Structure formats: C-alpha cells, structure tokens
Amino acid sequence: MVFLKCRQKDCTNKTVFKENYCFIHTKNKEKLTNEIHDYIKKNKIIKNLNFAFVPFDNIDFSKKEIIFSRFYKCSFKNANFSKTSLYSSFFDFTDLENSDFSSSSIRFVVFGGANLNNTNFSEVNVFSSNFIGAQIENTKFKDADLSYSRFIGAKIKNTTFYNCNLKKAYFQNMNFDDLSIKTSNYQEAILKDCCNGDTKIKGYIE
Ligand SMILES: [Zn+2]
C-alpha cells in the first residue's frame, strides 16, 4: 500500500483515488466524490486505493471486497457493509454511526479512533483487527468471532457481546453486562481492569 504525496506544496497528505492531489486540495470535490461513488457502484473489488476524507454516507458496499485501502477520516453514516470482505485496510478516525457490518469478514482492519455507535456487527468474522480508542455505544456484537482483536482504550457503552468468540481479544477498563458474561467466552480474552457490574473479572493471562 504505497500512495504518492499530494502535489500541493507543503501538504503531507497522500493523493486521493486516481488524482494528483489529496481530497482536501482537490478543486472540484463534488465531481470527484460522484466519480468515486460511481466507481464503488461498478466495481466489486476495491483494491490499493486511498479515499482519505471522502464522504461515503449512505453508500452501499455490500458484498464487495475491500483490500489494502485507506479510508482515514471518511464519513460512512448509514453505510452498508453487509456481507462485505474487508482485508488489511484502514478505517481510522472514520464516522461509521448506524452502519451495518452484518455477515461481513474483517481481517487485519484498523478502526482506531472510529465512531461505531449504533452499528451492527451480527454474524461477523473479525480477526486480528484493531478498535483502539474507538467509540462503541449501543452497538450489537452477536454471533461474532472477535478473536485476536484489540479493544484497548475503546469507550464501550450499552453494548452486548452476545454469543461471541473473544479468544485472545484484548479489552481494557470494560464493564461487561450480564448477557455478555453468560453467552461469550470472556475467560479466554485478555482482560485488563475489566468487570461485570461491581465484580472484577479475569480472563486468560499469557
Ligand atoms: Zn493536499
């Protein structure tokens, strides 16, 4: 994943999509946004592309394959990632509020600092992905494999991990609700300062 530097003097951003400038320094943002949305619509495989700062609210990514791509600070409100395959891509500091990841496959993906409020992670396969510092409120993790994923410093509230595989998932300062405790294998997770209500809980220690 190597992207060229924006041609604007003193700009350290990378070039967006197939342009010579980053999105911020693109003159006709509306035209480019439409071109990118059209490209997404027509292509099943989205690979080796930088989309940093591009708006994607309400866009349908379902059943697509997203590989080695970068979506830094993009907005994805109400976006559809159902049955999408995401591999080795960056969604850091994105706004994914109300988006849908149900039945998706997520491997080596970074959601650091992202807003994942009211998102749907039902029947997902998440492997070795990073939710460091993400905001996760009123989110549904159901029948999800979250093994080897890291939730360090994530702000998780009103969120249940129902029937999830938490093997070697890393949680810190997390308060698991009763349903998560009853239905998921938190004992196999790596837990740092985690609790169930007022009770401190212990996970797997290497
Ligand atoms: Zn630039």
Image (cartoon, rainbow, N blue to C red):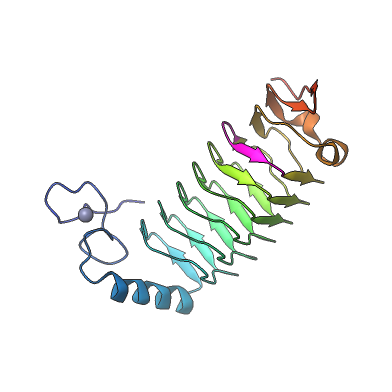
**Would you say residue 101 is visible in this rendering?**
yes
User: At 81% across and 40% down in the image, what residue appears?
Assistant: 180
Q: Nearer the viewer, residue 202 or 43?
A: 202
Left or right: where 70 falls relative to 61: left
Q: Dividing the image into four equal quarters, which quarter contains ligand 1?
A: bottom left
Left or right: where 91 falls relative to 200: left
- Vertical arrangement, residue 100 with respect to residue 39, above or below: above
The segment highlighted magenta reads: 151-158
Q: Nearer the viewer, residue 49 or 97?
A: 97
Left or right: where 167 falls relative to 48: right
Residue 195 location, quadrant: top right
Q: Position of residue 194 (x, y in %)?
A: 71, 25
Residue 17 location, quadrant: bottom left
**Would you say residue 149 is visible in this rendering?**
no
User: At 36% across and 51% down in the image, what residue appears?
Assistant: 1
In reply to whether residue 152 is colored magenta, the answer given is: yes
User: At 78% across and 33% down in the image, what residue appears?
Assistant: 186
